[in-house]
Amino acid sequence: KAGVTQTPRYLIKTRGQQVTLSCSPISGHRSVSWYQQTPGQGLQFLFEYFSETQRNKGNFPGRFSGRQFSNSRSEMNVSTLELGDSALYLCASSMTVAGTEAFFGQGTRLTVV
Amino acid sequence: DQQVKQNSPSLSVQEGRISILNCDYTNSMFDYFLWYKKYPAEGPTFLISISSIKDKNEDGRFTVFLNKSAKHLSLHIVPSQPGDSAVYFCAAKRGAQKLVFGQGTRLTINP
């Protein structure tokens, strides 16, 4: 059974640009959550989607948005990139909303210059 | 508001000894707790969990202890092995709400 797949693995963008990250969950999993990891801050929750609906949302500005498709794949978009958005963005899938066991992808390393 | 805190950014333990990683939380409504392990360039992997109705859960070399009155949980690894060197995150949740993670502790096992 394939794991959680995130693309791209690495990305370099310029301040002011926008970026879209993709996440394909484990087959059969309907919940996808997004996290931002920065040094010293741990994993900060961005949002969770289940059955194409946002179910939970973290404390990030509106520049961060996401969506989920009918096949459970999810995308995350960040507009007007800032230097502070440089981080590892992790996606996790689980069978149910906020499932007790979430499986993570390898992440997308975003660098904003 | 950091609801889950791992106050030790790093920990160094000799191979074969016990590693104890600690985690404190502030929200008494959390009812499920998890530990994740993360190697560089990989996503976190689930290690072990515990429900708030229990105070101990064991899986091989890994044991998690929960002290609800102190709002504290710990992960014990014994014996520690070089492959255990990684960053460990504790996480907590309440019902169907989001997982809240700590900042992580970098564990280094020395030969």
Image: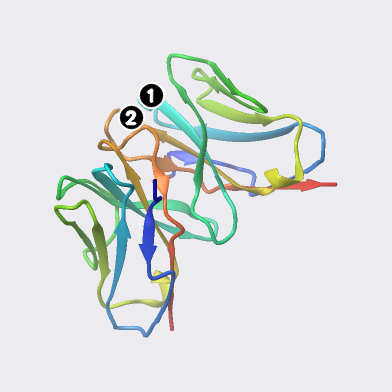
Q: What residue occupies the far front of the structure in this picture?
A: A1
User: Can you say whether B17 is above or below A65 in the image?
Assistant: above
**Letter of the chain that mark 2 sits on in the rendering:** B
Which of the image's four quarters has the N terminus of chain B?
top left
Question: Where is residue B79, by image quadrant?
Answer: top right
Q: Amino acid at mark 2?
A: Arg
Q: Within 10 Å of the Cα at label 1, are there few (<14), some (14-19), or many (20+) other Cα atoms?
A: some
- Identity, as a three-letter code, of the amino acid under mark 1: Asp
Q: Position of residue A101 (x, y in %)?
A: 40, 35
The outermost residue toward the right is: B111
Residue assigned mark 2: B94
- In the image, residue B90 lies at what x, y percent? 51, 38
Q: Residues within 10 Å of mark 2 (few under 14, many from 20)?
A: some
Q: Are marks 1 and 2 on the same chain?
A: yes
The residue singled out by tag 1 in the image is B31
User: Is residue A14 or residue A101 the one in the foreground?
Assistant: A101
> Which residue is drawn at the image coordinates 43% and 61% (left, top)?
A107
**Label 1: element kind:** loop
Residue sitting at 37 percent across and 40 percent down? B99
User: Are dots 1 and 2 in contact, CB under 8 Å?
Assistant: yes
